[in-house]
Image (tube, rainbow, N blue to C red):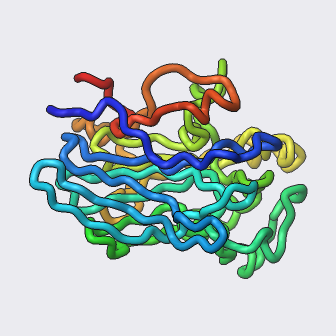
């Protein structure tokens, strides 16, 4: 089986490291067998940016498609940074774009709510805010949108209390503990999800992130210790009941990167993403 060891995608350079904002990125993706590859290109005109563009390619036949991506922000400041991950399903007929940690294109702040207060009873206006949209978007290879899922499609009423933000980082998911000690994942989004080796099952956990835990500590243990594991099909966007046993290891979500944790700052900026991050290069 042919595996691309490394492919570099667009990295948004020039981002400030102040606060919680990390260097931006949109990581490319490939199918399990390496045949189908999807990359993304940032808008060329920073003063009047249009949408990100994708290129889908069959590396065997040479077939190629291009189109626009929805919901991926473009910019070099705290509130317009992208942290996006592309996954290509077996057969290459669909691909998904996952944004676990950034705002979707929107106004600077939600119409109601504050990063310093708990959003216990969010209004419909707050939950439907554009910045909370397009967490997961699934496309056909030719660019037609199959499914768009925002936070309002995913979160239950009691889970909005965990939504908080600092600058360009939007927090609504609980980190996986194994990527929170001894450094940072090479991509900030890696702390919030697991992905099946065949790129058809996405897993994440709704609950308080490290910043939210101290904000909800007075709400009781049930709130502070809340966790809900969610699995989503990356071919059609439907929610999956997590099985108690799974015989196909390619369907079991695992840590989305190989290698060591990194130090903050330039180590993340200079990281070269693998197009096949859950499999060891060369095997």
Residue 43, can we see it? yes
User: In the rendering, at what x and y percent does residue 114 appear?
Assistant: 86, 63
Please tell me which residue lies in front, 218 or 182: 182
User: In the rendering, at what x and y percent does residue 78 appear?
Assistant: 75, 55
**23 vs 179: above or below:** below
Name which residue lies at 36% across and 49% down: 201
Name which residue lies at 26% across and 66% down: 65
The image quarter in which residue 99 lies: bottom right
Would residue 254 appear left or right of 186 to someone viewing this image? left
Residue 229, can we see it? no
Would residue 270 appear left or right of 87 to someone viewing this image? right
The image quarter in which residue 175 lies: top right
Q: Across the whole image, how many numbered discs are drawn on residues?
A: 0
The image quarter in which residue 118 lies: bottom right
**113 vs 269: above or below:** below
Would residue 228 appear left or right of 89 to someone viewing this image? right
Please tell me which residue lies in front, 257 or 61: 61
Residue reaching furthest left? 61
User: In the rendering, at what x and y percent does residue 170 appear?
Assistant: 70, 55
Name which residue lies at 34% across and 67% down: 139
Would residue 79 appear left or right of 262 to someone viewing this image? right
Please tell me which residue lies in front, 138 or 8: 8
User: In the rendering, at what x and y percent does residue 42 appear?
Assistant: 51, 59
Name which residue lies at 48% across and 65% down: 52
The quadrant of the image that shows the N terminus is top left
Please tell me which residue lies in front, 113 or 56: 56
The quadrant of the image that shows the C terminus is top left
Residue reaching furthest bottom? 125
């Amino acid at each position: 089986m042919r595996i691309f060891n490394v492919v570099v995608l667009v990295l948004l350079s020039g981002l400030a490291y102040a606060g919680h904002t990390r260097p931006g990125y949109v990581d490319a993706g490939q199918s399990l067998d390496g045949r189908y590859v999807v990359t993304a290109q940032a808008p060329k005109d920073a003063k009047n940016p249009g949408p990100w563009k994708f290129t889908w390619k069959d590396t065997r036949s040479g077939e190629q498609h291009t189109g626009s991506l929805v919901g991926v922000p473009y910019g070099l400041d705290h509130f317009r940074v992208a942290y996006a991950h592309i996954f290509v399903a077996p057969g290459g007929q669909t691909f998904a774009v996952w944004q676990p940690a950034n705002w979707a294109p929107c106004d600077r702040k939600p119409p109601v709510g504050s990063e310093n207060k708990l959003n216990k009873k969010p209004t419909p206006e707050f939950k439907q805010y554009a910045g909370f949209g397009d967490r997961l978007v699934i496309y056909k290879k030719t660019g037609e949108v199959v499914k768009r899922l925002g936070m309002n499609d995913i979160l239950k009423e009691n889970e909005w209390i965990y939504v908080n933000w600092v600058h360009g980082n939007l927090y609504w998911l609980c980190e996986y503990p194994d990527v929170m000690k001894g450094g940072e994942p090479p991509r900030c989004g890696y702390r919030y999800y697991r992905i099946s080796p065949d790129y058809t099952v996405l897993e994440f956990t709704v609950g308080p992130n490290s910043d939210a835990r101290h904000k909800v500590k007075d709400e009781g243990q049930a709130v502070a210790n809340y966790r809900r594991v969610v699995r989503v099909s990356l071919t059609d966007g439907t929610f999956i009941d997590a099985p108690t046993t799974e015989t196909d290891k390619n369907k079991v979500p695992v840590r989305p990167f190989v290698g060591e944790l990194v130090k903050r700052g330039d180590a993340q900026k200079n990281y070269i993403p693998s197009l096949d991050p859950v499999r060891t290069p060369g095997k």
